[in-house]
């Protein structure tokens, strides 16, 4: 996962189009360790200042949950962010996030992410929203995770946000009959990841899905993904 020093590229992401809020209120962060998986895995939650109208689940939560601060200054629905922490080891992270490398490891992480974490959120925060108000998000290898979980669990995640997805998990020959809405993102200066995103956009559109494919003049990094995130939320949950 890129940090601010390596993120970005020759040009900044296009300015976020969501309308800024005046004097935004601040949400809070809660981090707890859930014991059900891998000897205990941390989850960080951004709790918005107002009752959540939407919820986004994501991997790499140790960094991603902090993006709730970005939403506070934009006129988007009140959105809770559930960030399941990822692994520092890139190969182990990939095995959790992509179903094509280690099916058993992926399945164990999938059950934790989809079932245990969601149950905990409902119990801990009294929040359980329908699929049309729920999304799954990820970037790079996490973009593969978002696509895999979104296609497998359309009844839970009505929207998928996938930034610069990796190339291990590819569109299946036979798409599910019911598909989520999908917002894909790729940068002109990250051709491998842009190609992956474009491949998914084409396959999903051919299968009848509602798809946005956003391309920006950026390279692979968190700065670009952060710039796109409010647009994803506005598109999926706009007032």
Image: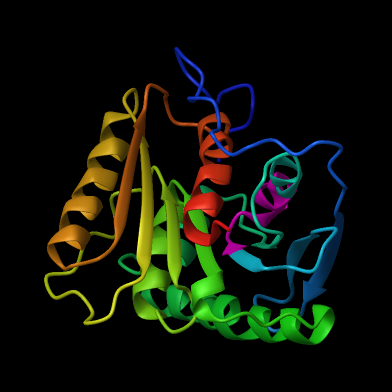
In-image side of 55 versus 235 (left or right): right
**From what the image shows, is residue 28 above or below residue 74?**
below
Q: Position of residue 207 (x, y in %)?
A: 16, 68
**From what the image shows, is residue 147 above or below residue 213?**
below
Q: Position of residue 25 (x, y in %)?
A: 87, 47
Q: Which residues are magenta?
A: 57-67
Of the 4 image quadrants, the one containing the C terminus is bottom right
In-image side of 164 versus 125 (left or right): left
Instruction: Name the dominant secondary structure of the magenta segment.
Output: helix
Snapshot quadrant of residue 203: bottom left
Q: Per the image, is 63 magenta?
A: yes
Q: Residue at x 74, y 47 (%)?
A: 66
Q: Residue at x 30, y 74 (%)?
A: 179
Of the 4 image quadrants, the one containing the N terminus is top right
User: Would residue 49 be seen by someone viewing this image from the given angle?
Assistant: yes
Q: Which is nearer the eye, 189 or 80?
A: 80
Q: Position of residue 65 (x, y in %)?
A: 71, 53
Q: Which is nearer the eye, 208 or 192?
A: 208
């Amino acid at each position: 996962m890129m940090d601010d020093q390596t993120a970005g590229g020759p040009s900044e992401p296009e300015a976020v189009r969501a309308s800024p809020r005046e004097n935004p209120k601040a949400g809070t962060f809660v981090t707890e360790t859930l014991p059900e998986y891998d000897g205990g895995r941390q989850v960080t939650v951004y709790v918005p200042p107002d009752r959540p109208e939407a919820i986004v689940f994501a991997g790499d939560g140790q960094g991603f949950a902090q993006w709730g601060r970005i939403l506070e200054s934009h006129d988007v629905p009140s959105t809770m962010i559930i960030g399941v922490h990822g692994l520092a080891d890139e190969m182990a992270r990939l095995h959790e996030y992509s179903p094509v490398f280690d099916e058993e490891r992926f399945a164990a992480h999938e059950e934790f992410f989809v079932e245990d974490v969601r149950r905990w959120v409902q119990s801990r925060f009294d929040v359980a929203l329908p699929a049309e108000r729920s999304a799954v998000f990820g970037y790079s290898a996490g973009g593969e995770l978002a696509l895999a979980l979104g296609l497998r669990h359309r009844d839970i995640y009505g929207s998928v946000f996938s930034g610069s997805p990796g190339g291990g998990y590819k569109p299946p020959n036979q798409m599910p009959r019911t598909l989520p809405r999908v917002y894909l993102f790729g940068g002109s200066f990250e051709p491998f990841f842009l190609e992956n995103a474009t491949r998914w956009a084409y396959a999903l559109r051919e299968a009848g899905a509602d798809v946005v494919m956003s391309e920006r003049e950026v390279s692979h990094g968190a700065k670009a993904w952060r710039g796109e995130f409010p647009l994803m939320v506005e598109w999926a949950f706009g007032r």
